[in-house]
Image (cartoon, rainbow, N blue to C red):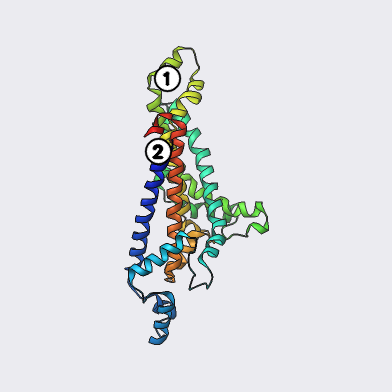
Amino acid sequence: MMPFLLKRIGTGAITLLLASIVVFAMLDVVPGDPARMMLGMNATEDAVQALREQMGLNQPLIMRYMSWLGGFLVGDLGRSYTYSVPVSQLVAERAVVSLPLALLALFLSTAIAIPVGLYSASHRGKAADTIAMGASQLGVAIPNFWFALLLVYVFAIALRLLPAGGFPGWTAGTWPALKALFLPAIALALPQAAILARVTRSALLDVLGEDFVRTARAKGLSRNTVLWRHALRNALIPVFTILGLQFSFLLAGTIIIENVFYLPGLGRLIFQAITQRDLIVVESVVMLLVATVIVVNLLVDLSYAAIDPRLRGT
């Protein structure tokens, strides 16, 4: 188990290093002078140069990268020049919106997809299977921002059951905060549930054709018992893979949804920082999201070993 864990940690560390180089280099080559854009086109050259020096933009590229990476590794994410506060403070304020939103969306996606995939696999070729897979195909095809607008029109404007946007804060109470996150979570969850349901069905169909399933049926076990106790566990590896990717997507890919619902989360923070050319915020938040993706993938790899002991020695 230890070689398996060390191998995955080493791979994650190398991936994080390469990602930091790509993120820093990509933002550095973006056209435009961040200092001039922040001060405005009418700013004097002296003021622009002073801000460039304050932001460290007058230093060599490699020195700026090493300084930024060193600070990131010790938890110093820098200071936002737009908000004049530490980036870590901005992240902490916005994460209390984005993280619960991603977790709620992941819960809804899993709660919908696993039963649909199981039901569809157990009724392969029947009308219920065709309807379920047709609905999942539609869910994959519909953009989540369009679905978000449809949800706002139906549940917020027409029925007036849920708020159309904004976030009251957790200090206003758990229920008002969850109500504000419910529509965005559904908009994020349903397209992902459609993908997960198809993967679950496919994985189960592969397992149901194995010899051990036929042996279990021959011993007199019911179809539902075989499906839940034997087939599902052996089909979990591809399902867990998609779940890990979906959580990463839900956490890092909320820029559009948070802007549609006007939620003060990490996605909206990145969008605002890009428009304001606040590079230190963009670099640090993107790297935090990359690190989150790597950690989630590591946990998914460890779950493989827990599900299938044969993988622990690889």
In this rendering, the answer to whether 121 lies above or below 25 is above
Q: What secondary structure is marked by label 2?
A: helix
* Tag 2 near tag 1, CB within 8 Å: no
- Residue in the image at 43% along x and 50% along y: 293
Residue 71 falls in image quadrant: bottom left
Q: Is residue 205 left or right of residue 268?
A: left
Closest to the camera, between mark 2 and mark 1, is: 2
The residue to which callout 2 is attached is: 3
Mark 2 → mark 1, Cα distance in angstroms: 32 Å
- Up the image or down, 149 lies above or below 200; here it is below
Give percent across and percent down for residue 270.
Answer: 46, 63
Callout 2 environment at 10 Å: few (<14), some (14 to 19), or many (20+)? few
Q: Give the farthest residue toward the front.
A: 2
Quadrant where the C terminus is found in the figure = top left
Label whose residue precedes the other's in the sequence (2 or 1): 2
Q: Residue 172 versus residue 67: which sits nearer the camera? A: 67
Read off the residue under disc 1: 213
Q: Is residue 168 left or right of residue 42?
A: right
Q: Position of residue 166 (x, y in %)?
A: 57, 60
